[in-house]
Amino acid sequence: MLKIVRCLGVWLFCRLDVLGGDAGRAPRDTCEASTQKCDTSVEPPSVVGLLPPRQREEVIDYPLLSFGEPATIDLPSGERLGVASGSRTWQVGNFSKSVNLFKVEGMMTKDSAEDMLREIPATLSKAPDSVDNLPVYEYYLDHHLLFNSATVPKRLLRISNSIIEERILPYVRKQYNCSVCRVCTSLVRRYQTDERMRHPPHFDTHAFITVVVALTTHGTHFRGGLYVRTTPGTEEFVHVAAGDALVHQSDIQHGVWVKKGNRLSWILWIQDSPQCKGPLASWHKAAAIGDPLAAYQLSLMYKFGAGDVSQDRRVALELLQKAAWGGLPNAQRRLGDVFFEDRPLISNMKAAFEWYSRAAKQNDTAGAYQAARMLQHGLGTTKDDASAARLYEQAAGDSFEQMPDAANELARMLFKGRKGVPKDKQEALRLWEEAASLGVQAAAASLEDCYARGDGVEANAAKAQEWKDLADKL
């Protein structure tokens, strides 16, 4: 269940800034932005026992990222890999920047992918993720600091190490002209029904290069999967077959939304340091020439003293302001957080509302939610329930980064009606059910009360008890 940390007196979405998680918007369920075909079915897996049987249901199309024709790259071993290039363009204010994503066909064979699946334990780690604090369902093969690979099945290590040494590292070193690049973290992640189906949009700021090798096939074993975007509202999914690899740097904002089926992938975080020193300031040197994305990521490093920089909150704030004034919605929302934390100062509350509002205008979900809270309570701005409801609706409608607290707050306003917000108990009940299913205890408690009193629904003691039981678990 989604756990939202309540902090600073207002419902802030608190996650580790070092990964730079971001808000999105409602999905664009069309193929208009792509020249590739959308998937139309979900087939059974070839590895028995790891994936569930095929399920039939109406298929919703969605945009896919387009790649160019594959080029051939020769490896030192004499092997040849087909590499297709895709790109996204950041258009932030007056700043424009293209970032690349490479799809390497057959980084490993389908047989090797199935061999890896057979060796991965059925029970995976449920440690909280650093982006959204939810269970990650992952299995580490190697970690340069935190993990001893002696516990990994020897056959699994033989398979993975062979591919790393013979294909992945030779390709990365040649593609990025990085002779010292090495794998610092290697793990497998699983997304499936009743576990985890989403991962909020974020940057891999701790990695010089990220390699994601598909162990299952898009359109066959699952729909949806990994998507990339620049600003919220530009999301496009990436089609990969088992054995294909996606390779990118930390300027690619990406997330996961598995709409149906099971997705397993092998993730490798690579650094340009034999010692795996962590993020380096040199990765973001473009901040000095007005790159708001580089300034934003470098600000996170200084905020926490990550990698090769010492903690310096003043420098972090200067860089964050540069990125926010440059028009980056991620930075605008986080600058709002900075001003909100100094809430005793009225001027800072006004500044917080201004920056949250700027982010919201660019479809930033958390920014919209925060601006709505401030409008609802008259913090840093004039109280305005109608405007707050519109922003709650915007935040609640995001399908890429869910904000169930927004649905809960909007339901509260609709159930009783507010100035400029007509009463609509049926819509309120629907929103409460949605929020409760995503882990909001207050929503489940509200539904318990409605069924107990017969308010908006026919009284039903059994239903009231069901919602009470759920509220007690959350």
Image (cartoon, rainbow, N blue to C red):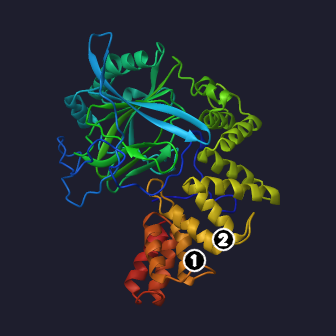
| Residue 98 x %, y % | 50, 32
Q: Of the numbered discs in the image, which one, if any, rests on residue 139?
A: none
Q: Is residue 217 visible?
A: yes
**Residue at the spot x=40%, y=77% of the render?**
466
Report the number of numbered marks: 2
Residue 230 is left or right of residue 323, and the answer is left
Q: Of the numbered discs in the image, which one, if any, rests on residue 376?
A: 2
**Residue at the spot x=25%, y=32% of the render?**
113
- Amino acid carrying label 2: it is Gln
Quadrant location of residue 56?
bottom left
| Crowdedness near tag 2: few (<14), some (14–19) or many (≥20) residues, C-alpha within 10 Å | many
User: CA–CA distance between discs 2 and 1?
Assistant: 10 Å
Mark 1 lies on a secondary structure that is helix
| Residue 358 x %, y % | 64, 54
**Residue at the spot x=70%, y=59% of the render?**
353
Q: Is residue 279 above or below residue 77?
A: below
- Amino acid carrying label 1: it is Met
Q: Is residue 440 above or below residue 86?
A: below
| Residue 288 x %, y % | 68, 27
Q: Which residue is mark 1?
A: 413
| Crowdedness near tag 1: few (<14), some (14–19) or many (≥20) residues, C-alpha within 10 Å | many
Mark 2 lies on a secondary structure that is helix
Q: Is residue 44 above or below residue 303?
A: below
